[in-house]
Amino acid sequence: MISLEEAKKAVVDDFSMYDEWLDKYEYLIDLGKNLDSYPEEEKTEDKLIKGCQSRVWLNSKVEEGKVFFQADSDAIITKGIISLLIGVYSGRTPEEIAGDDFGFINEIGLKENLSPTRANGLVSMIETIKALAAENCK
Amino acid sequence: MDIDGIRAMFPALAQSVHGKPLVYFDNAATSQRPECVVEKWESLVRGSNANIHRAVHKLAVDATEEYESTRDAVREYINAASREEIIFTSGTTASINLVAFSYGESFVSEGDEIIVTEAEHHSNIVPWQMLCQRKGAVLKVLGVDDGGHLKTEDLESLLTERTKLVAVTQISNVLGIKNPVKHIVNICHSAGCPVLVDGAQGIVHEKVDVRDLDCDFYAFSGHKLYAATGTGVLYGKKEWLEKMVPYQGGGEMIATVRFSGTTYAPLPEKFEAGTQNINSIPTLKPAIEFAKSLQDNEIREYRKRVFDFLYGALTSNPRVHLYGVPRGTEDKVSLFSFSVDGAHHEDLALILDKLGVAVRSGQMCAEPLMDRFGVTGMLRASLAPYNTLEEAEYFIKSLEKALGMLI
């Protein structure tokens, strides 16, 4: 598995290939469409991330000291964003995730190019990922 | 005046967003401001900024004249019987809250009933829920049918002698259907019940005559009618306003203040505590003049063409579900809320934004209505008289492009 720094750099590199926001959306839509399916029975109220305009579910489990995430959303661009996040952070140690600054999100300009309500959703997604990891820190 | 002439009055429309010419289709949330409104606001802030009513100096006299002549202009525009019936507020929400409190304190007790409709904005639901909670009163709901029309035929059976008020929107901010408020007022008055009309959208699309409607209260905002934000109006029949307790206490609304007891100012000051939005309220004058100029037949015909095009384009797409389906040719305004099979409203709005099109997505402050139609949200395109047929065509093309990306 590539390191967290390498994974983040790969996302930034991918995004830098697109000048137009519509192309970036196409990329996110693709990510969303290809995200592993999320179990219907886990679409419960407690798995919903607060603060998103669309519904986003995030579930986590710990195996051999690593945190694995599963996610879904009824909006495809949001699903692409959460897919991008869990693609980077899933399978890493709780300490690695909870200690990261998630600064690469700013580098790809995701926050500024989403409406404020969506930016809040993004912030909520990041905070939920961090909180789920922190629960498992030693 | 033609469409180019109208557009030239709105500097905000000439801008580009994300490198594309702006198509502003979120007018039901707030309209853009014409130059005349901006100029009025600027001249007040720069030249006539003083607090109104009390001081005798020149600036105060000028500011008072601007403010009070606005009251006359609003009275005339909605054909109220007297200027005492026009209360300035910060917006529709504040106007409704004022009635919910002051009318509620004066006339509603435990076991009484308030009726709202399923088509209401949260601003015409929550204040009544709060009132009911405070007083132990009961909130009843008049439903809408599948086409988004109020089930007016159910109203008579909902009304009882305990019903103290019916609150209904003239035009829903989601459905765009013109509700038969005059008929509703008739039914309610026959049962001895007063009616509050939420005119937030209605004032923009209808020529409002409160005496002809015979409603007891009429609430609207200035900012959807091209005036500055933070400007609102409550029209209330004098007979009600006089019997209602004040909403807020403070400056302006008093006659005499003693620790042994305070007496209140006569209407309309009784309901205007504290320093009002004195720099912005007078922008209602040029805004009203502008709105009047839109009554022109040529402009109405053009707007009808834009409506027909959008209605035709949206309803001919089998994936599109339109909420608020007109029964006739004149009962829906250019406000289209819809969902699309296989595409989330938020995704559509995000992509449309990048194409320069500003539309609203989500629940539009009407969650009960979303539940009624079984959706988590909708996409809404709401037009103003400055929107063109070309913009409507571009919107439909952009929507098709967005759908192509998503499906």
Image: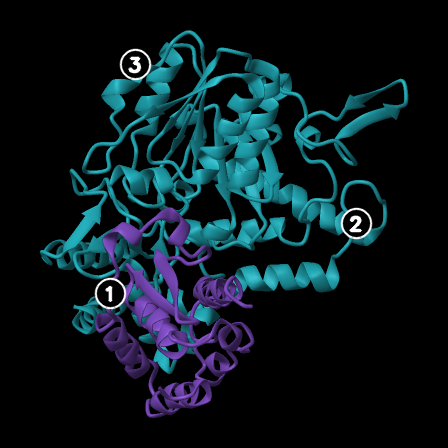
Residue B352 visible in the displayed image = no
**Cα–Cα gap, marks 1 and 3:** 41 Å
- Chain B visual colour: cyan
**Closer to the eye: label 1 or 2:** 1
**Figure quadrant of residue B339:** bottom left
Q: Residue furthest top?
A: B161
Q: Nearer the viewer, residue A97 or B87?
A: A97
Task: Name which residue type carries label 2.
Answer: Ala
Task: Name which residue type carries label 3.
Answer: Glu
Measured from the top left, where is residue B83 in percent x and y?
A: 60, 32
Q: Residue furthest right?
A: B259
Q: Quadrant of the C terminus of chain B?
A: bottom left
Q: Are marks 1 and 2 in contact (CB under 8 Å)?
A: no
* Host chain of mark 1: B
User: Which residue position is annotated with label 3?
Assistant: B156
User: Which residue position is annotated with label 1?
Assistant: B392
Chain coloured purple here? A
User: Which residue position is annotated with label 2?
Assistant: B60
